[in-house]
Amino acid sequence: MNLMTAASLLTELQTSDMLEIDGLHAFDFTLDDQQLLIKSMDGRAEKRWTFSLAQIEAATFDDALQSWTLTGDSGEHRLVCMAAFTGNNNDEEDEHDDA
């Protein structure tokens, strides 16, 4: 049984590089001491979601779907927190060449 809590959602949000909300990927999100603001593009339309800390604290984790259910002013939303992978532009072979 997974014992995810709202406190761990806050922790996940603080360490996440990307979110998925309602099936849309969102790289642009901010979490401050009052709210979570998420922005995403759906085609040409920008979508925005705002959640208060109380709404984040009330979130529930769905173990089967590995996602959070958040209820905001616009209804219920499914949120997945993700960490991004970054590449290295350095070519290690060039670093070791004796020119």
Image (cartoon, helix red, strand yellow):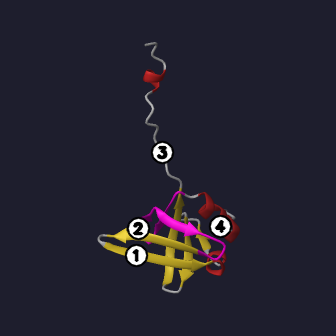
Q: Earlier in the sequence, mark 4 or mark 1?
A: 4
Magenta span of residues = 17-35
Secondary structure at badge 3 equals loop
CA gap, disc 1 to disc 2? 9 Å
Q: Earlier in the sequence, mark 2 or mark 4?
A: 4
Q: Residue at x 62, y 75 (%)?
A: 56
Quadrant of the image for the N terminus? bottom right
Q: Which residue is mark 2?
A: 24
Q: Earlier in the sequence, mark 2 or mark 3?
A: 2
Q: Earlier in the sequence, mark 1 or mark 2?
A: 2
Identity of the amino acid at label 1? Lys
Q: Which residue is mark 4?
A: 10
Q: Is residue 65 visible?
A: no
Residue 60 on image: x %, y %: 61, 74
Identity of the amino acid at label 2? Leu
Q: Residue 90 lies in magenta, yes or no?
A: no
Pointer 1 and pointer 2: residues touching (CB < 8 Å)?
A: yes
Secondary structure at badge 4 equals helix
CA gap, disc 2 to disc 3? 20 Å
Q: Badge 2, how many Cα within 10 Å: few under 14, some, many 20+? A: some
Residue 22 sits in quarter: bottom left
Secondary structure at badge 1 equals strand
Q: Residue at x 52, y 69 (%)?
A: 79
CA gap, disc 1 to disc 3? 26 Å
Secondary structure at badge 2 equals strand
Residue 99 on image: x %, y %: 43, 13
Q: Which residue is mark 3?
A: 86
Marking on residue 47: 1
Identity of the amino acid at label 3? Thr
CA gap, disc 3 to disc 4? 23 Å
Q: Is residue 83 above or below residue 42?
A: above
